[in-house]
Amino acid sequence: MEAWHPSGPDLVHAGDNLPFLRALPDESFTLVYLDPPFNTGLFRQAERVRGVRTEEREPGGRLGFRGQGYTVTRERTLAFDDRFVDYWEFLEPRIEEAWRLLAPDGTLYLHLDYREVHYAKVLLDGLFGPECFINEIIWAYDYGARSRRKWPTKHENILVYVKDPDRYHFDAEAVDREPYMAPGLVTAERARRGKLPTDTWWHTIVSPTGKERTGYPTQKPLGVLRRIVQASSRPGDWVLDPFAGSGTTAAAAAELGRRFVAVDDNEAAITVMRDRLAGTSVRFSG
């Protein structure tokens, strides 16, 4: 495996991300974005869920359910069926590596769907500490089929955790602004400027016929990743995406003057990224 160093060029690596992540030096990245394969189609029995073990904590500590202090342990993963356990046995060591690789002012974004996000938050509270939880972003869109048996699911979830809640970088003013939903209720100047986004992001999916489309099935919109990169990194900072897919994180980082490392083990993803990042100084390895 070729070595990576923060003084080197941007990098796209083809291969399993876990051994690659383990070879990277500590605290190298200001931003890590994880968009792992969603664990869909699972069957879970509610009666098997035991909950999180609570323990007495020192006075003044963070209080949880019924005013008790709580400590999240490996028991937090509960008694899920084997398919769910396999998924988290795959994902957990990669999240642990992401924590190690985050700089002291770094931020992790974990992008999942409604099936897994509540379990992921418990896991991340255990790995990072509940005090390091910053946001749950709801990315909402309005496209695709509509169920008549339930409210149609038109959103995904992005959990935001930081390495150190007292030191993390966040620049709200650097983020692209949104139009006001009721511009007549604000001054003309404020309406022209737009408003800062909240934790609910209304942004269309990648149009099947749009210029942004690469043909990669799980491609995320550039606008969503641009906002993440703008808020949680500075020009020149390093950004890491271990499940790079179509390379949207790398494209956003390159556009905004950030450095990036992107990893994927899918040949189709590497091919898409070669085309998408053509004209940049990125190096391909693996």
Image (cartoon, grey):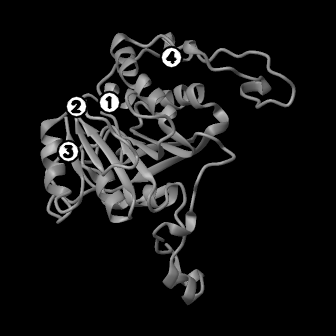
Marks 4, 2: nearer the viewer: 2
Secondary structure category for the residue under label 3: strand
Marks 3, 4: nearer the viewer: 3
User: In this rendering, is residue 105 above or below 1?
Assistant: below
User: In this rendering, is residue 240 above or below 82?
Assistant: below
Say what amino acid the circle numbered 3 marks: Phe
Task: Name the residue carrying label 3.
Answer: 284
Q: Residue at x 63, y 38 (%)?
A: 132
Task: Name the residue carrying label 1.
Answer: 20
N-term mark: 3 or 1: 1
Crowd class of label 2 (few under 14; some 14 to 19; many from 20; radius 10 Å): some
Q: Is residue 65 left or right of residue 1?
A: right
Task: Name the residue carrying label 4.
Answer: 77
N-term mark: 1 or 4: 1
Q: Residue at x 59, y 39 (%)?
A: 163
Measured Cα–Cα span from mark 1 to mark 4: 26 Å
Say what amino acid the circle numbered 4 marks: Thr
